[in-house]
Amino acid sequence: MLIAFSMPSFAQDKTEKPKEPIKPALIVIDIQKAFLPMMSSDKDMAMEYINALIELFHKNGYPVIRVYHTSEEYGVTPGSDGFEFPETVKILPTDPKVLKTYPDGFNKTELDKVIKTKGSNTLFLCGLSSVGCVLATWIGAQNFDYQAFMVKDAIISHNSQYTKNVEQMFDAVTFDMVKLIVEHAGR
């Protein structure tokens, strides 16, 4: 018996499309008062990195987009104290705000529209949970053809080792790398 395998031929496209310049946006996910107490002990360091990222993006004129999880089941609804980010977070009232009810910040929300309105194509994700909503939003970003990166030390979960695993598995970028990219984007 002879079995034949047919391999499809893939023609290489000889004409490369010009690379679009990097237009970054920072996506700050679910750092709400109701959820922070559930996070591991490294949350204080992560919050410092998140604030440094927010300042970096503001200073360089790039968008900071806030994503909030809302859940009536857990009492985390707009207007409740637990729904809000801590007062120590350096967001501005003008930073766009997106509400979500699923882990993925893109699922049935206006996040894609907000990002496109801001003209961004490269996303840096921070917040919580590294094994939940940050990871789901990172996957969602791929579905919308964004270049997306988690920021090392600026994501948190209930278990520090899980966060380290996610950072390693998904090649999280360091703050210094984000700073280099943001300070030189569009030049």
Image (cartoon, grey):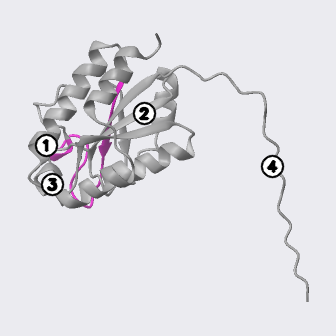
Instruction: Kindly give the residue lying farthest to the front in the view shown.
Output: 2
Instruction: Kindly give the residue lying farthest to the top in the view shown.
Output: 187
Of residues 48 and 83, the one drawn nearer to the viewer in this rendering: 48
Going by the numbered disc 1, the residue's amino acid type is: Asp
Q: Which residue is mark 4?
A: 10
Q: Secondary structure at mark 2?
A: strand
Q: CA distance from mark 2 to mark 3?
A: 23 Å
Q: Secondary structure at mark 4?
A: loop
Mark 1 touches mark 4? (CB < 8 Å): no
Position in image of residue 22 (x %, y %) = 49, 22
Q: Secondary structure at mark 1?
A: helix
Q: Which mark is residue 81?
A: 1
Position in image of residue 59 (x %, y %) = 27, 13
Q: Does the magenta run of residues contain 76?
A: yes
Give the magenta range: 63-83
Indicate the quadrant where residue 97 lies. top left
Q: Callout 1: 10 Å neighbours few (<14), some, many (20+)? A: some
**Residue 77 visible in the current orientation:** yes
Q: CA distance from mark 1 to mark 2?
A: 28 Å
